[in-house]
Image (cartoon, rainbow, N blue to C red):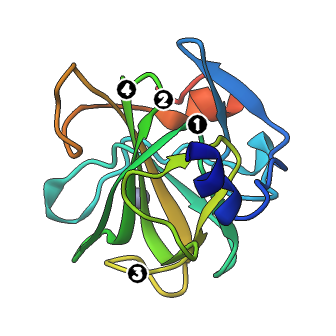
Amino acid sequence: MRRAVARSLGAAAILAATVAAFKGVAIVIPVEGLKASDLVDSWSKSRAGGRVHRAIDIQAPLGTPVLAAMDGRIEKLFASKRGGLTIYQRSADGRLILYYAHLQGYRRGLAEGQEVERGQVIATVGASGNADPAFPHLHFQILETVPGSGWQDGEPVNPYPLLTGRRALP
Ligand SMILES: [Zn+2]
């Protein structure tokens, strides 16, 4: 059953060149065609309302494929005022929640509960929610969870050093 679902999503686009690991879990840059050197550390940047950015913004043209960063399961498809069209994915080992926001659209057939493979197309880059329409990007967050936690719970971890193998900015 699991196989059939994966196949119905089409051939997995395992194109991402950079594969790093976070606590033993393989991770790829979640936007097709980008290299580590294309990424900018946008962790800790200030945002409106005194909020602090606990994620990475990955700039890419509208419609660029968004890839599952890790193997796992689609936990929640959700639309919010700030995040726009979003996806919450749980890692295969259950310890992490991956959050993808400002999406243009979901991959056709994508649904909650589906298993996804690292590198598989799950959505397209957009500027939905409070994103600047002139700056389409993927807002990508990694949350460390505790057992039994909900799909929105967790402690953010900076994705930048994980995706690039570099040290984060202080
Ligand atoms: Zn962001």
Give coordinates of residue 23: x percent, y percent.
Answer: 53, 12
Nearest the eye: 67 or 11:
11
Amino acid carrying mark 1 in the image = Met
The residue where tag 2 is placed is 92
Q: Is residue 118 above or below residue 83?
A: above
Foreground mark, 3 or 1, reads 1
Q: Are marks 2 and 4 in contact (CB under 8 Å)?
A: yes
Foreground mark, 2 or 1, reads 2
Q: Earlier in the sequence, mark 4 or mark 3?
A: 4
Crowd around label 2: few <14 · some 14–19 · many ≥20 (10 Å): some
Foreground mark, 4 or 3, reads 4
Nearest the eye: 41 or 90:
90
Give coordinates of residue 168: x percent, y percent.
Answer: 54, 27
Amino acid carrying mark 3 in the image = Ser
One can see residue 165 in this view: no
User: Gap between marks 3 and 1, in whole Å?
Assistant: 23 Å
Give coordinates of residue 84: x percent, y percent.
Answer: 33, 75
User: Gap between marks 2 and 3, in whole Å?
Assistant: 27 Å
Task: Give the image quarter of residue 148.
Answer: top left
- Judged left or right of residue 13, residue 24 is left
Ligand 1 lies in quarter = bottom left
The residue where tag 3 is placed is 128
